[in-house]
Image (cartoon, grey):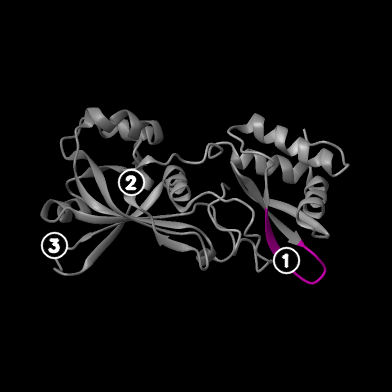
Amino acid sequence: MIGLVSNRQHAGSGPPTPDVPEPSLAERARTLAAIGLLGSLATHSRRFPGFPFCSMTPFAVDAGGRPVFFLSSMAMHTQNLHQNSHASLLITQPDVSGDPLGAARLTLIGAATVTPAVEVRDLYLSRYGNARYWQDYTDFAYYRLEVEGVYFIGGFGVMGWVPVEDYATTAPDPLTAVAPGIIQHMNADHADALRRIAEHDAGEAPDEASMTAVDRLGFHLRLKTADRVHGRRIAFPREVKDAGEARSAFVEMVRACGTRAAG
């Protein structure tokens, strides 16, 4: 998992480490929008005026973080948008284990209107290849949500409105695509190294340590002792931009602990 939730509440009620750098809310919002596959689209009900109507829909975000949809005119949410284009999209963190309220989620607010297929088709099909079979159906069209409001929740007690300009101009975390592989590798092959890093860099003495998230600035560990489970965030010695730089940073940290280097 990429680092979407704050150290203040990640993986339990461990002591906060405010000096450890974390991605901004804008960066975490853009990252969640980039990895999300399904969202809950809320439109204004045409059948029940004054009430919201929510439905599930796939989406892809463009370079500015604007969600793109491929909608059928027969769908209720599309009919609602024809009457009132104001909508919101709820994106939740995928593959959540444990309390879902401790996971990240993002709400994007704006007007969803038809957009030229030539501008967004390749983007959408790069994520949903099966949609190519519907390209020639006249009752389908592309819509894009022009974001006017951004609200991000990074778990318990971490939430806020993100300035739209910050959201639009911030890039997703560069480790977004490789984070799952990094986490799997470190937990499977270097669990003892993670425990030693927790001792050396965070002053902890866990019986077990496992990585639960990683981003360009650091990573989260879930620490187990005899009487509790809690989380701590550990900073990289420097910002990393890809899997190779992350590996080099881990090797440096492990060597500083006096244990076998991660590889």
For this orientation, the residue located farthest to the right is: 258
How far from the left and from the top, in percent, is residue 77?
22, 54
For the stretch drawn in magenta, what is the main secondary structure? Answer: strand
Left or right of residue 107: residue 221: right
User: Residue 103, percent across and down?
Assistant: 52, 60
Q: Quadrant of residue 7?
A: bottom right
Residue 158: x %, y % from top left? 50, 63
Between 165 and 13, the residue placed more toward the observer is 165
* Type of amino acid under label 2: Glu
| Circle nearer the N terminus (3, 2) | 3
Label 2 belongs to which residue?
165
Q: Nearer the viewer, mark 3 or mark 1?
A: 1
Q: Quadrant of residue 237?
A: top right
Residue located at (40% from left, 56% from top): 106
For label 1, the residue is 229
Q: CA distance from mark 2 to mark 1?
A: 38 Å
Secondary structure found at label 2:
helix
Sequence order check, earlier mark of 3 and 1: 3
- Residues under labels 3 and 1: Cα distance? 49 Å
Q: Name above or below for residue 146 compared with residue 152.
A: above
Q: Residues within 10 Å of mark 3 (few under 14, many from 20)?
A: some
For marks 3 and 2, give the CA distance: 32 Å
Q: Secondary structure at mark 1?
A: strand
Q: Is 134 in the magenta?
A: no
Q: Residues within 10 Å of mark 2 (few under 14, many from 20)?
A: some
Q: Nearer the viewer, residue 83 or 254?
A: 254
